[in-house]
């Protein structure tokens, strides 16, 4: 073989090696660099704050790290999840596994134990609403759900209510949630009467008269001790329960109310009844084949709760 051919082969090999080394060059994680990059990528003005979270291995994407970027402006905020490879390649979007429910991540985080509910246990479709008693959009959605849901789906749907008062905007919302939990402690069935009453009187309620309006509602309820209810509200006896609900909402990265989950599918804007009905119908048909959501999915987890007999312990659906 000629000397010139050897030289040519050597040069090619060197180029290949250099190219491979360049492509395998490890990128060093740098929050400042990521902030600059995403500000340019998403055209974020300087009035918006950007906080880059710490990286963690992406469970569903080997070779990538999961990073949450929080964007803030005033009291509003939004979390955006991105995935970064060791070379610095950024992937934005959702990752799905065709073998699992597409909304499994949120389904695993939704905890309906000890929450007010309507509908039949074992329902094909489970709705979980995060709501705020002082929120006008929540009132409209609550009335829509109460008027239509069980009337149209007496056995196929279960609805759970979770408090998510936005204290920065609504000064009596958390107190209203505490009152609702006090009612639920006394008589779970009476919660929905309280729910309807408070939403129905939303415009006339203030932080100062909330307890009085609740007392008016309670005095004619045979299953509610109004004195006990007043004491529960005064001492904020159920505040820890409301705080736990709010923490669940934050873990789900809920940004506003109402937020509705339909078998794990997140709906952040209020829906009309025709749109909600179409989504429920679609889910009912899909679950005939998939069986990976709803309360009839066969994935019950019985919890051992101190002080509760096992036969009466609530069932958590995952």
Image (cartoon, rainbow, N blue to C red):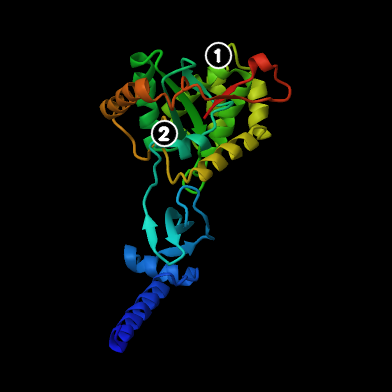
Examine the image and state in which quarter residue 275 appears.
top left
| In this view, 10 is above or below 132 | below
State the count of labels: 2
User: Viewer-proximal residue, 183 or 126?
Assistant: 126
| In this view, 122 is above or below 317 | above
Q: SS class of the residue under badge 1?
A: loop
| In this view, 103 is above or below 283 | below
Q: Are marks 1 and 2 in contact (CB under 8 Å)?
A: no
Can you give x and y, in whole percent of width and height, for residue 73 in the image?
A: 42, 60
Mark 1 or mark 2: whose residue is earlier in sequence:
2
The residue positioned farthest toward the front in the image shown: 1
Quadrant location, the N terminus: bottom left
User: Viewer-proximal residue, 277 or 148?
Assistant: 277
Could you tell whether 266 is left or right of 68 in the image?
Answer: left
Q: SS class of the residue under badge 2?
A: loop
Mark 2, Cα crowd under 10 Å, few <14 / some 14-19 / many 20+, is some
The residue positioned farthest toward the right in the image shown: 307
The residue positioned farthest toward the top in the image shown: 222
Task: Please give the name of the residue rendered at 57% of the width and 19% of the height, measured from the top-left corner.
Answer: 188
Mark 1, Cα crowd under 10 Å, few <14 / some 14-19 / many 20+, is few
Numbered mark located on residue 101 in the image: 2
Q: Where is mark 1, residue-wise?
A: 220
Can you give x and y, in whole percent of width and height, for residue 316 in the image?
A: 56, 26
Task: Please give the name of the residue rendered at 39% of the width and 76% of the height, measured from the top-left corner.
Answer: 17
Task: Please give the name of the residue rendered at 38% of the width and 47% of the height, measured from the top-left corner.
Answer: 94
User: Viewer-proximal residue, 198 or 257?
Assistant: 257
Could you tell whether 8 is left or right of 54 in the image?
Answer: left
Examine the image and state in which quarter residue 237 appears.
top right
């Amino acid at each position: 073989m000629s000397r010139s051919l050897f030289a040519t082969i050597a040069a090619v090999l060197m180029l290949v090696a250099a190219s491979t080394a360049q492509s395998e060059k490890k990128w060093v994680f740098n929050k400042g660099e990521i902030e600059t990059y995403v500000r340019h990528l998403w055209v974020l003005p300087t009035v918006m704050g950007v906080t880059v979270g710490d990286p963690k291995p992406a469970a569903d994407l080997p070779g990538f790290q999961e990073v949450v970027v929080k964007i803030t402006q005033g009291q509003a905020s939004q979390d955006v999840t991105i995935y970064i490879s060791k070379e610095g390649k950024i992937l934005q979007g959702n990752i799905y596994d065709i073998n699992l429910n597409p909304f499994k991540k949120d389904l695993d985080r939704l905890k309906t134990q000890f929450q007010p509910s309507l509908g039949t246990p074992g329902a094909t479709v489970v709705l979980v609403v995060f709501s705020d008693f002082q929120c006008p959009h929540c009132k409209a959605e609550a009335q829509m759900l109460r008027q239509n849901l069980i009337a149209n789906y007496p056995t196929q749907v279960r609805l759970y209510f979770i408090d998510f008062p936005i204290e920065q905007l609504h000064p009596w919302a958390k107190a209203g949630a505490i009152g609702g939990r006090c009612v639920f402690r006394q008589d779970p069935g009476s919660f929905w009467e309280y729910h309807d009453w408070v939403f129905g009187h939303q415009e006339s309620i203030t932080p100062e008269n909330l307890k009085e309006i609740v007392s008016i509602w309670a005095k004619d309820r045979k299953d509610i001790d109004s004195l006990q209810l007043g004491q529960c509200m005064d001492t904020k006896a159920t505040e820890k329960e409301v705080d736990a609900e709010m923490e669940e909402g934050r873990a789900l990265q809920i940004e506003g109310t109402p937020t509705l989950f339909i078998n794990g599918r997140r709906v952040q804007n209020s829906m009309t009844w025709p749109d909600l009905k179409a989504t429920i119908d679609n889910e009912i048909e899909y679950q005939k084949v998939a069986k990976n959501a709803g309360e009839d999915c066969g994935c019950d987890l019985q919890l051992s709760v101190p002080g509760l007999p096992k036969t009466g312990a609530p069932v958590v659906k995952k």
